[in-house]
Amino acid sequence: MIKRRTFLRESTATAAALAFPLVGGAQPKPLKVGILHPVTGALAFSGQQCREGALMAIEDVNRTGIHSLGNAKLEVLLGDAQSTPQAGTAEIEKMNEAGCAAVVGAYASAICLATTQAAAKVGLPHVVDVGVADQIVERGLKNTFRFGPGYKVCAQIAVNNLHVLNTVAGKPAKTVMIIHEESLFGTGTAQLLARELPAYGFEVKEIVKHANPTRDFNNIVLRMKSINPDIVIPANYYNEYALLVRTMQQQKVVPKAIYSVLGGAASSYKFLKEFPDAANGIIDCNHWFNPKDKRAADLKKRVEAKGLFFTYEIFNTYTAVRLLADAIERAKSTDRAAITAALESSAFSDHFMPYGPTKFVNGQNTGAQPLMTQVIKGDIRVIVPRDYREIDPIFPLRA
Amino acid sequence: MPAEPLLCLEDVAIAFGGLQAVQGVSFDVAEGCLCGLIGPNGAGKTTLFALMSGFLVPDRGRIRFAGHDITGRAPHLNARAGLTRTFQIVQPFAAQTVRENIAVGAHLREPRRAAALAAAEGVAAQVGLAAQLDKPAADLTVAGRKRLELARALATKPRLLLLDEVLAGLNPQEIADMIPVVRAIASGGVTVLMIEHVMQAVMSLAEHVWVLAQGRLIAAGAPVMVQRNDGATPLRRCRNSRPCAIRPVPSRTTRSPISTSIWKPTRPG
Amino acid sequence: MLDVAILLPSFLNGVTTGAVYALIALGLTLIYGVLHIINFAHGAALMVALYAVYFLKNRAGIDPYLALPLVVAAMFALGYGLQRVVINRAGHGKDENILLVTLGLAIVLENLALLFFKSDTRTIETAYTLTTVAIGPATIALTKLVAFAGALAAATVLLWVVHRTDLGRAIRAVAKETQGARLMGIDVEHVYAMSFGIGLACVGAAACFLLPAYYVNPQVGSGFVLVAFTIVVLGGMGSFAGALLGGLLIGIVESLGGLFLGESLGQIGIFAIFIAVLLFRPQGLLGARP
Amino acid sequence: MRDLVTIAAFAIAVAVLSSVLRSGVWTTFLMMALYAALLAQAWNLLGGYGGQFSFGHALFFGTGAYVQVLAQTQAGLNAWIALACAVASAAVVGTGVGALSFRYGLRGSYFALVTLAFAEVFRILAVTVGFTGGGVGVMLPLRESAANLQFASRQGAILVVLGFVVAGLLVTAWLRRSRFGAWLQAVRDNEDAARALGVDPLRVKLGAITLSAGFMGAGGAFYVQVFQYLDPNIAFGPATSVESLVAAIVGGIGTLWGPVLGALVLHALAEFTRNLFGDAPGLNMVIYGVVLILIVLFVPRGLSGVGRDVRAAWRLGRAG
């Protein structure tokens, strides 16, 4: 920990030197930032993880404060979207009323659609942390910025990478079975995969849609046994994903590869810790940090020290808040329009995500991309793309 | 040519599982008469009322009302045709006031709310409920509820009113008060057929009675004859083929012999 | 798709899953049969029981199947207390009030769990979680077979209690005619509380069989409530044998329906039966005419 | 007559309030409170006046919402015409479900459970059938103009939902003053007695469910015009059914102002607890649940009943 603190001190010292010292010791006006997530209701787990990530980012930013605003500290206004669009909208109104300069959050796509819309009405800049639905950034809302990738990009990259993996391994896998949850991201991803995969010579044997929550997966695993696909592609949230993989392990169904897209549990240290052998070999194309960046590892330790799991909700929201802090720093004001402009022209690169320098094209960070990870020897390692590769992929799991 | 009887039952029968509740009952009720249906408990009286009003559909036999065959027709259609009933166990609209209760009946003839409420007031006066119009039905005494039940049915301006033990459970004074009310209704042109155990009422009100026992009609005639049980006119059976036979209705005063066994208590079991 | 290698396992899977559903429905049908209310807090009760089993396993190291008596007793006490203290007082003789109270209880229980246990999904690891038993071409998880046996045992115990014991006679009397029972000297409030207690005890038993093959988080209850309602109606409101039969049937329909119509459309099979039974045979398979 | 005066006063007061209120929080609160009142009123028409408890009113809410958005996106209809179609189609679904369940004499908990099942079947269909966009849901493009029934300022939306609520109040008031209402409440209190007085229970109950479904459809159409996104869970999920029935019962079923009062109190309670205890996730809902139980314990006949008791007691006091 000590090493980290010295690191922080040096970087802030250099930044302070550059910043134009604010004349006069007027107590800087508190800068309010809204952190809005569904911390109750069906999405409570992800919502609370996002909130943890945001609070840690705020904590880091407030160590030095916003230099261009006389080291003003970010004042947090927490909001609970209660897993419904209505509650999300009501919270946005409350944040606007409380004079927030910007909002980060909402996690779920359906909620983001409503909150970004409500924020747009009052010109409140809204950074989307996770919400993967592409409609969020396709409505021409000037105030909405998504730092991470949408599900079209994820699905596209997933298909390409699968093709690359399969070709490199001599095309052992041909047949595919997609199992997805009937939610927005589940259905959207499945439809896109089903359309793209045949072009690369894969045969989509079956697409199985399941309810959320699903009480029992034996049936689907039974179908899997009878179809015996080479690759199983799950696209669902943590609970269902974990139940599915456990049932597969129970029924001793081992496809050539379990290749999930935005899988809830595939790249989750929680799943890895609770079901090490069930998780072994699973590939996931999902939000992931740059494994080579030390700051990510530091954050992971901090998170685990708090007794939490380092999941994508945490590091996505963490970087989203840092993006906002960087924009406020450059905007040199708490005025919403200035912050929106700063976000639009943001080239934020001081982050540990594999996105490179930020570039927003109508609200979507073009550099955003998911990484492909695989559980190998008890850890989640990045396997594709090459410049972030930590270890060579094991594909297929069995001949 | 005397008019066709208002109500004509031809060999009506119904069984619940093994129990033959009503077995082949036939009789007719002339328009304008105030007559009674008596018999021990479980004789099938209320079942017969349910058959007449359409709450039950007979297994066998026909029911004709005002020249139409209403066998198995739904109660609300019968009510619209002018045949309505009260219930042995009173069924008030508990949450509503007396006025609103009666208005429901009045609405059968009067679509406008104000007119129905006004009509309700008139009928309430007729049955002696004028003072309690704005009281919730739930707060009425047993006698009050019986009056309400009567008033509601009356408000539908029926041609035939089936009263199911409207005097049961009342004390002598209340019975004495109710008898003129029922008589006034009958004299007002409404044909009344009532099930009653209170013999005092039957004797003073009914011009003609039918006696039912174990689902069978065992006697008919003027109440005084029935009581003296020296034989009422033999049972008349409606010819099944033609519509109810047009026969001279025995004049009110003729004597009708009745079999002596009527008043011996039926052997249990 | 139609060969035995698929149909048999799917059928067996349906029956074993259905057994756990039946156990949950047994509690619900008892509560409905006696109290004539639809217990909206049944799902939340299942969640509470699942947490109890979880903590007994992780903190006290007691295996779920060994924890059965403990959890059943605890849930019985919870049920008895809730009915006596909260639900009974709220009735005021109006069904909609009791319904609202159980709804309020569900909200309170679910969010208390969210508050104290956080919202992350928890599972337990037992030696036998992954072991399976081969029955012909089908391999069925051991936990499911134990659940099946457990549900049958619990159902028979319940049937014995209701038909052979004084308490059972009192329960059936109160179910049939509350005022009459009161006149016979039956302490109706006590019987209400006993029924609610036994109802939740069934849920406790179901939790012990369910957790090894499933997970727990504050929202887990809602997934089972709807199915339990279906089973109660299918089996006949207030009929235990009906609930058992209904549970097995629904399990099979869900399993086979899922096989042929796809998992989410398969669910429609359950509700189609639900509507058909309600319309054409409201008294259900074995229930008395309503 | 007295009802009409109070309804007019209510409408004017809210309209003035909506133009006076500047703060976004309060205008959203007012809009959502009116929206909750609309759902409660719709439920009350069938549950309060018809005595038929439905656990699946989301069925009509979702039908109205889907027709509202699909009529515009796929059939290119104008929003106001779509609104008429939404209300009509919800009413038709109401009549259909009503005809099926009432014809088979379903009452009490049986009727409640069959509506629950219908809502669930529609939710699953909405997921699997194509034109509703399945799980991906369906978006209503943002075109803020009065003609498109989308309003830049909240005030426009408030006036629209106020219109629906006032219409609901007028229909409820008419119900209390009309033959249909008298027959409906007669069937509610005692179906057999009503049949003996010439009331056809099936036709009356069908009328009630059609009215109730129509208003619920209006609520669905309003929801999708404001939030512009809809998926099977939002449309047919049990949350809306529970919200409408709880507000109506807490407010006092079978009354004119009960549902409106209940919706206002519960919505205020939800907002209050969320603002005050938002930081500890779940605490706000625990308090919401506890207060709900307390209301049922101590105000069994509903909040509007309290008003009536107080007035009655006051009148007795004065007379006494």
Image (cartoon, grey):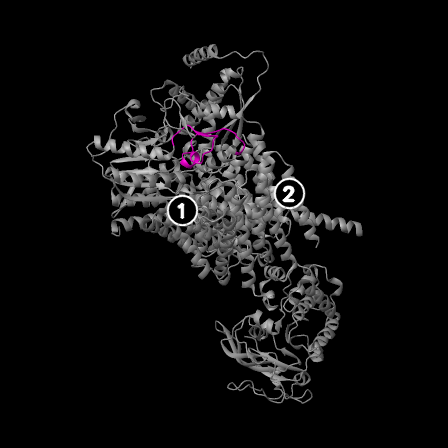
Give whichever of A102, C109 is nearer the camera. Answer: A102
Residue at the spot 40% in from the left edge and 40% down from the top edge: A184
**Image x and y of residue B188, in percent:** 71, 77
> Does A224 appear above or below B68?
above
Does the rendering let one see residue A90?
Answer: yes
Query: Is residue B79 shown left or right of residue C19?
Result: right
Amino acid identity at mark 2: Ala
- In the picture, measured across the screen, residue C36 lies left or right of residue B88, that is left
Q: In the rendering, at what x and y percent does residue C185 appear?
A: 59, 55
Task: Give the quarter of the image for residue A374.
Answer: top left
Does the stretch in magenta take in A140? yes
Which chain does tag 1 point to? D
**Which residues lie in the magenta part?**
A121-149
At label 1, the amino acid type is: Val
Q: Is C117 part of what is drawn in magenta?
A: no
Q: Which residue is mark 2?
A: D15
Q: Which residue is mark 1?
A: D127
Q: Main secondary structure of the magenta part?
A: loop
Question: Is disc 2 in the same subunit as disc 1?
Answer: yes
Which residue is at 61% across, 65% downward? D193
When asked about the image quadrant of residue C173, the answer is bottom right
From the viewer's perspective, tell me whether residue D102 is left or right of residue D308: left
Tell me the chain of label 2: D
Q: Is residue A140 above or below residue B181?
A: above
Q: Secondary structure at mark 1?
A: helix
Q: Is residue B77 above or below residue D15?
A: below
Name the one closer to the observer, B32 or D257. D257
Left or right of C23: which side holds A70?
right
Question: Distance between the Cα atoms at labels 2 and 1?
Answer: 39 Å
Q: Position of residue B195 (x, y in %)?
A: 63, 75
Q: Earlier in the sequence, mark 2 or mark 1?
A: 2
Residue A252 seen in render: no
